[in-house]
Image (cartoon, rainbow, N blue to C red):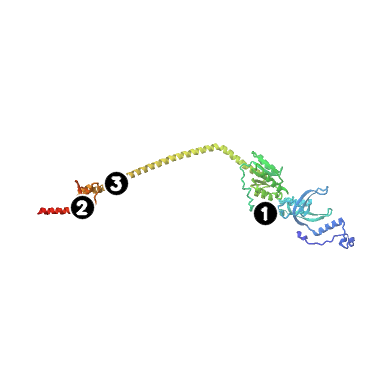
């Protein structure tokens, strides 16, 4: 729609007809202030004859009664500024020298715009919110000022920006491994030391503290006041988070709570600064932001996300009360549990003793049977061994008897030894005294040479011969 007025238009200022001939050249053209402002106003009507859409960022929003003191109408005034190139977090930068368009929302149009916003229930017009608005561009002669007279708004534009920014930030946190970092921290079973960040005096603070007070438990709460929406909210909330995480002692948990509102009211909790701060804290963060249907990047990064401030406090109370209940229950059940344990132990002991006795008796009986079998086997083996050895000894005795020298002598053999007892196996020197044993006597003789035997034989033969003659 705005593109219809993007064409270049050459426009000659309107001046009184009776002065046309006075301006033969541009250098001679002179306006009164009234003529000039009226000419510019007419030029704007020609350049922008219809309403158009324009997008930008709300700044310096203010509402009040009309300029006329007698008027009861309420008008809204703000500036529409150009977001910076790096400005993708839906908050107003304080940088100067950015293109700025003054905007006025007159009372009649304000009511219509409010009807649209109430029907949509997603956004509110406030500083730092990027919007797409409809209206007409005018030149206000009384002040020689260009202004945009707003008549309508496109809520879907702002919602889409919020969603896109949130999804982009979540993707970055996941890629960097920061989304689950705070959730990985251990939550103490009894979180009695609580760091609380909220707007002081708000309903969220009252609801949260009421839940703690009515729990019947004792708490230590360190609260830091911080704005929950607006331009400074992300920076102030992040500073509060860092302040609690560097205190001593460190709180068991940090609770970040805020009541409900439009999506734009909760935009601070989709801010990258808050998300990264929560991810890097050494203490687990519990969030209770908005209503049941609200969800933010802060919720996604926190250790525990609850739907409301009351639910956040109830979650903390529930954890502590559960631990206290278990402790008390353990105290009351301890004697009975101990007695049951003793009874069970005695039963186990008795059973083990009876089992041991039975097992010992069984093993002893088996050992006795085994011993008896072994004894019988040993006796049989011993008897067999005795018989076998007896037979072997008899055989040896027979052999010994057969080799006995006395038996040999009885069969007619003799044994000859020298006088010193050496057995004569071969010849001996002549003159050696020999002892010859027979079965009945021992004969003594002297060894002679073979020649002597031959001589003796010859002599014997000779003697025989002589005797024969």
Disc 1: which residue = 168
| Direction from residue 386 to residue 26 in the image, left or right | right
The residue at which mark 2 appears reads as 449
Q: Residues within 10 Å of mark 3 (few under 14, many from 20)?
A: few
**Residue position for label 3:** 389
222 displayed left or right of 366:
right
Going from N to C along the chain, the mark reached first, 1 or 3, is: 1
Taking the view exactly as shown, the residue that stands out farthest to the left is 469
Q: Considering only order in the chain, which callout, 2 or 1, is on the residue closer to the N terminus? A: 1
The crowd level at tag 2 (other Cα within 10 Å; few <14, some 14-19, many 20+) is: few
Q: Do we see residue 438 in this rendering? A: no
Could you say where residue 44 lies in the image, as x and y percent from the top left?
81, 58
| Label tally | 3
Residue in the foreground of this view, choosing between 415 and 108: 415
Q: Nearer the viewer, mark 1 or mark 2?
A: 2
Indicate the secondary structure of the residue bearing disc 3. Answer: helix
């Amino acid at each position: 729609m705005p593109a219809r007025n993007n064409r270049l238009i050459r426009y000659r200022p309107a001046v009184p007809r009776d002065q046309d001939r006075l301006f033969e050249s541009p250098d001679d053209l002179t306006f009164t202030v009234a003529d000039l402002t009226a000419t510019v106003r007419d030029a704007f009507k020609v350049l922008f004859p219809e309403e158009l859409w324009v997008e930008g960022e709300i700044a310096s929003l203010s509402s009040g009664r009309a300029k006329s003191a007698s008027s009861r109408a309420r008008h809204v005034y703000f500036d529409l500024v150009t977001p910076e190139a790096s400005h993708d977090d839906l908050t107003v930068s304080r940088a100067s020298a950015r293109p700025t368009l003054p905007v006025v929302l007159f009372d009649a149009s304000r009511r219509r715009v409010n009807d649209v916003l109430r029907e949509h229930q997603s956004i509110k017009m406030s500083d730092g919110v990027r919007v797409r608005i409809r209206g007409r561009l005018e030149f206000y002669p009384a002040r020689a000022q260009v202004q945009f007279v707003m008549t309508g708004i496109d809520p879907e534009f702002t919602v889409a920006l919020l969603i896109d920014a949130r999804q982009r930030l979540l993707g970055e946190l996941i890629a960097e491994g920061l989304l689950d970092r705070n959730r990985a921290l251990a939550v103490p079973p009894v979180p009695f030391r609580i760091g609380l960040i909220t707007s002081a005096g708000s309903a969220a603070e009252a609801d949260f503290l009421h839940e703690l007070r009515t729990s019947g438990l004792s708490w230590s709460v360190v609260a830091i006041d911080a704005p929950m929406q607006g331009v400074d909210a992300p920076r102030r909330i992040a500073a509060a988070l860092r302040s609690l995480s560097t205190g001593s002692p460190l709180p068991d948990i940090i609770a970040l709570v805020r009541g409900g509102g439009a999506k734009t009211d909760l935009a601070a909790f989709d801010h990258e600064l808050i998300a990264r701060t929560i991810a890097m804290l050494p203490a687990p963060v519990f969030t209770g932001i908005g209503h049941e249907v609200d969800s933010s990047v802060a919720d996604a990064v926190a250790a525990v996300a609850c739907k409301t401030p009351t639910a956040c406090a109830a979650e903390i109370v529930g954890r502590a009360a559960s631990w206290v209940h278990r402790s008390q229950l353990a105290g009351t059940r301890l004697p009975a549990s101990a007695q049951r344990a003793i009874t069970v132990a005695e039963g186990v002991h008795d059973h083990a003793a009876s089992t041991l006795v039975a097992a010992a008796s069984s093993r002893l009986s088996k050992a006795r049977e085994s011993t008896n079998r072994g004894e019988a086997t040993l006796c049989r083996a011993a008897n067999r061994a005795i018989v076998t050895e007896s037979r072997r000894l008899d055989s040896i005795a027979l052999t010994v008897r057969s080799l006995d020298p006395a038996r040999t002598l009885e069969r007619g053999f003799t044994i000859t030894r020298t006088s010193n007892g050496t057995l004569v196996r071969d010849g001996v020197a002549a003159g050696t005294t020999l002892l010859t044993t027979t079965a009945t006597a021992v004969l003594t003789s002297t060894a002679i040479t073979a020649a002597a035997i031959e001589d003796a034989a010859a002599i014997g033969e000779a003697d025989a011969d002589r005797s024969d003659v």
